[in-house]
Structures are given as C-alpha cells and as structure tokens.
Amino acid sequence: MAVKVLKPGLATTVQDLGRPGYYHIGIPLSGGMDRHALAAANLLVGNEAGAAVLEAVFMGPELEFTEDAIVAVTGAELPPKLDGEPRETWTSFRVKRGQILSFDFLKQGARGYIAVTGGIDVPVVLGSRSTYALGALGGFKGRKLEAGDELPIGRAATTGKDGRRVAKELRGQPVGMPTELRAMPGLYWHRITEAAGNGFFSDTWKVAPEADRIGYRFKGGKPLEFVPREPPFGAGSDPSNITDACYPYGSIQVPGGTEPIVLHRDAVSGGGYFMVGTVIAADMDLIGQLQPNTPVKFVKVDMNQALAARKSRSELLGRLHSALA
Amino acid sequence: MQTRFSFGGDEHIFAEVGEAMSLEAFFKSLFITNAVRDAKIKGVTEICPANASYQVKFDPDQIKPDDLLTELKRLDSASEKSEPVIKTRIIEIPVLYNDPWTHETLMRFRERHQDPNGTDLEYAARINGLDSVDAFIKAHSSAPWFVSMVGFVAGLPFLYQMVERKRQLQAPKYLRPRTDTPKLTVGHGGCFSCIYSVRGAGGYQMFGITPMPIYDPNQNISYLRDFMCLFKPGDIVKWKPIDRAAYDAAVADVDAGRFAPVIRDVSFSLTEFNRDVDAYNSKLDGVLHGR
C-alpha cells in the first residue's frame, strides 16, 4: 500500500518521535514539533503513539491512496477534504482506494499531523523515521515531500476504526492571547542587566517570519542591555558572543541582544551566541503551533514549576491514551 | 578553573568549564563527558562535549535534576586528580587551499566581508601579521588541531590549533553571514577552524576545500559505512596542503570507493604536550606517517 503525493504542500515531512543520542555530533532529535498532536493522530488510527506520520506546515498536501485506509488529521485546524468533501480534524475517517485527500486553508495553529493506519514506512535511520532536512537524513530521501513521491505505508498490526474523536480538552493546543511560554532563566542570564531581564519577561513578543523546525525567532520586545565585559579569548567581540557551546533544546539565544530565537526539534546543536534561558519541555509543543505574528509572552518559572508542568502535560497524554484505548 | 553549572530548562544541565577557550578547558570538558558516559547514569540521554563547556540532556522522570547535578559536580572534582591523557586518533585531511570554488563563493559575497578588495586568505594573512598567503597556509597546516566540538549541523568539526595562544591564528567572522558555502570548505572564525559538512549558510572565512567527505547520510563512502560522521570530539587533525592534480585524483578515488584516509590511533598527554609543544607535535606527525 502506498500514498501518492500529488501536491506536496509547503514543507511536508515524515516525522515520528525523533532520534535521540546523536546530538553530540550535531544530529538533532527531529520528530514532530507538536508531539502531543502527533501521538493523538496515531492513536486515532490505531497506531502506536510514536509511529511515523506526515507533518504539514501552514498548507496541506494533496494525497492519493492506492488502497483503503483509516486516516486522522490533528494539530492545527487544517480542515481535510476527501474527494472535495469536508472531514473533521481530530477524528478518524475512512479513505477508499483511489480517493484524494486534500486540505482547506489553515484556520488555526501551524502544523497538521496526518496519520495513516500502519504508519509511513520509510527506512529507519539511526533509530527513527524522522526527517532531518538540513542533514539530508531520514524521512523520505532526507527531504520534504515533492509531487510524484510515493510513500510506503506499513502493514497495520490492528485495523483502524473510523469515527473516533479526540475531545477538545485532550488536544493540548495553545490557548489564550498572547500565548504564554514558560521559561527558566539560566545559561548566560548573567550577561544581561537586571532591567533587561525584567523587560524580557514583561515585554510582548511576536513570532517573526523566520520560524521553522530549527528555531522560532521573536521580535518586538526591547533590545537587551549587556553587562560590560572584556571579551574572553575565543568568544568574539560582540557582547552577545560566547565561546561556541552546546545549545539546549528550547534554549533562547539572542544574537546582538535584539531578537530571541528558541531552538526546536531540528536545533543547531551549538554555536557562539549567549542564551538567556530555556523554554520548558512541557511548552515546546505549543511553539510548533504558532503562526508568524502571534503575540507571545515568556513567563518566568523555576525548576519545581517546570516539573509540575511536565507532570500535567504527561497526565494529559495519559488521558488521551485511555480515551483512545 | 571553577566549572559553572546551570539548568537548561527541565531536561539539560549546562556546564561552562571556562569562559575563554583553552586546551585545558577543552580537555576537562572531554574528560568529564567521557566519565559521564562511562558512569552510565540512568536517565541521561545525550552527552555533548563542546569547546570549553559541555551539556548533559536527561529525563527528569528518571533522575531528579538535583541528583544529576550532584553527580556531575562529583565527577567534576574527581577530574582534577586525573592524569590528563586521552586515547584518540590523528587524521590527515588533504586541503586544496585557495581553490576555485571557495574563491568563486567569496567573490560572490564580497560586500559582506571586512576587506572587499582582497580574498579571505589575503585578509587572514595580513591581520595575523604574516607577509604572504603562502606563509599563512604554512602557519595553518604545520601544527595539528584538536576537534574541540562536533556540531552546529551534522558532523561539522570545530578545530582548535595546538600551539601556544600567541601563535594561534585568529580571524573575525564575515560582517554578515553568507547564504552559501561550498560543501567541505575549510573555514575559520575566531580561533576556530571548521569543515562545512554540508552546503549552506556560513560566516567563517574560507581558506580552501578538502576532497575528503566527512558526512554521508547514505553511507556510500567506504570509510563512512560504519558511521555517517567521520569526526568525534577529541580527534586530532593534521591538514595536508595539496595541489589541484592531487585534489582531482583524490576526488576520483573517493568516487571509485578506493580513497583510504590516513587515520592512526594515538595517545595524547596534555602534560607532555605543554612541556614542549613543537617537539610533541612533531612526535604526533611521526605517528601519522608511521615513523
């Protein structure tokens, strides 16, 4: 069984839960930017939560099915259509051989997850089917989809059912305006003045157009003022430079002190810019659903709050599993 | 050297061994990350040494952040008592300096450079007080370099020159980054050289190109079949200047699957190295060439 790509969408890639263990040589985790939505799509069609799906950003692909299948679309409000007929997001539906799945315009969010019973069966590379496009690794030929590609679908261990639905309160999508991203100050926080640190957390930022799987850039807040220093050997002369170091996932670097960049699943693993802190793991999924121009506030939390948020996110996933068991 | 620890969110501990780059800071980072790997700590998922710092990623559902921090601090103080010796490899990397491809690229992005009227090599020679491009190439290739970090993108090595600080070559990055760099360009920014593992954006000065692939996600290259990235932090690199004919021959050998890189196992002692840098480097050269 296969899925033929008639139109690829903007940047549609194969993703699962990623490829841990190779960050020390510059190969990032990759995997779905909104892992909760990815798991939901899989559970809806009867897959394991971490099976490979398609991640479509801003614009859906057009796909033709060579066999009958059960499909679900979660994440962004990217309304699916089957031979032109509307279908619900967050709800599994049946696709007949020869039918064409396309998408209406994006209504909310940024990334849709398209799961098919059996999962997208591209080769496993270093333990994962996720695409790392910068390194031409994994996924379908190491790249985003193109028209004419034929995606193999795995043999399903169970038969999927149509008409299964994820309730609103189990979807874990961003709520409220501005979107709040909780972050722990740290790393090179000491490089900026107290006033700059306060400004960083009180200003409202907006998602910049440069927002992709590597990182999300934000603009609109006040530039950060640095504590003066003699540049250390190897760091470079700009006050925002450091001796090139590792970048945590979710770390917030601010080149030149002007526009923060939060690194995401395809993070560059290191570099020479200071970081003011790190967005907590529980809020990383939310970033993947932010459109350019969305207002955002960074909310200062400590480790205990981060762990509490982590627990509540994991309980949400637990409830999703129970609901779709 | 007092290591500064910080949590990077709820999943990372970041440790800055030194604010400034030094062989001592790099060595300690490498040493501790090796110790962390050997300790097989439950819940640790990524162990990343960097130039003068390191990072450990963990799953806080498996190990309490404070417990891991305590363990890292213990390994950090234990490292003070250890002899700074590592078992590693020395790898010869052929380089066509002043090659036509990086030359074409640097001309294309000239308005982003500090010196729009020269080349990157001419500029680097001048600001390092060397009287010619040839003298610069000699300074770049005569002493070995440590792979002090692998990353940014897949398989890209940062390299730190194994000479006293006053002899180290330095050059700023481009004023504005380029949107293009040929694959396998040998670049330099700050005190670090690098080899671009993939084609793409970049801000380092461009000095030359190697015919020897260092990253192959398809694992077709004979010496990358076991693993797709050539470099590991702690590897030692020796540049070998080659001419165009040797470059073309090497490319043909790579394509035909018969290119055999020169790689030797070696033990490196920081104490002995610091005692007499030049003598130690010439000993390393001897290992490389089987003398």
Image (cartoon, grey):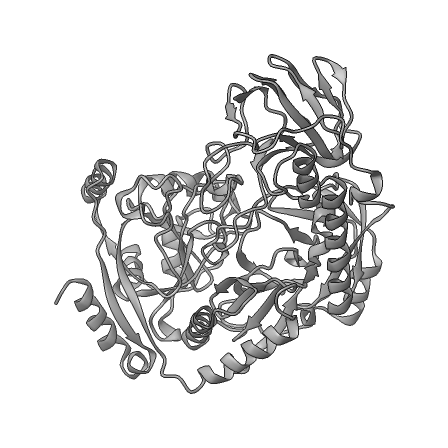
Please say whether residue A322 is visible from this viewpoint.
Answer: yes
| Residue at image location 38% in from the left, 59% down from the top | B232
In this view, the residue in front, B201 or B262, is B262
Q: Residue at x 22, y 43 (%)?
A: B250
Examine the image and state in which quarter residue A87 appears: top right
The single residue placed furthest to the right in the displayed view is A176
Image height check: is A237 above or below A41? below
Residue A247 lies, in percent from the top left, at: 58, 59
Classify residue A305 as left or right of residue A19. Answer: right
* In this view, B10 is above or below B97: below
Residue A9 vertical position relative to residue A302 in the rendered view, above or below: above
Estimate the x, y position of residue B38 in percent, counting from the top left.
Answer: 43, 71
Quadrant where the image shows the C terminus of chain A: top right
Is residue A237 visible to the viewer in this orientation of the structure? no
Q: Which of A219 and B291 is in front in this view?
A: B291
Question: Residue B270 location in percent, x, y?
Answer: 34, 78
Of residue A228 and residue A152, the one placed in the foreground of this image is: A152
Image location of residue A227, percent across then percent down: 69, 72
- The residue that appears at 44% across and 64% down in the rendered structure is B191
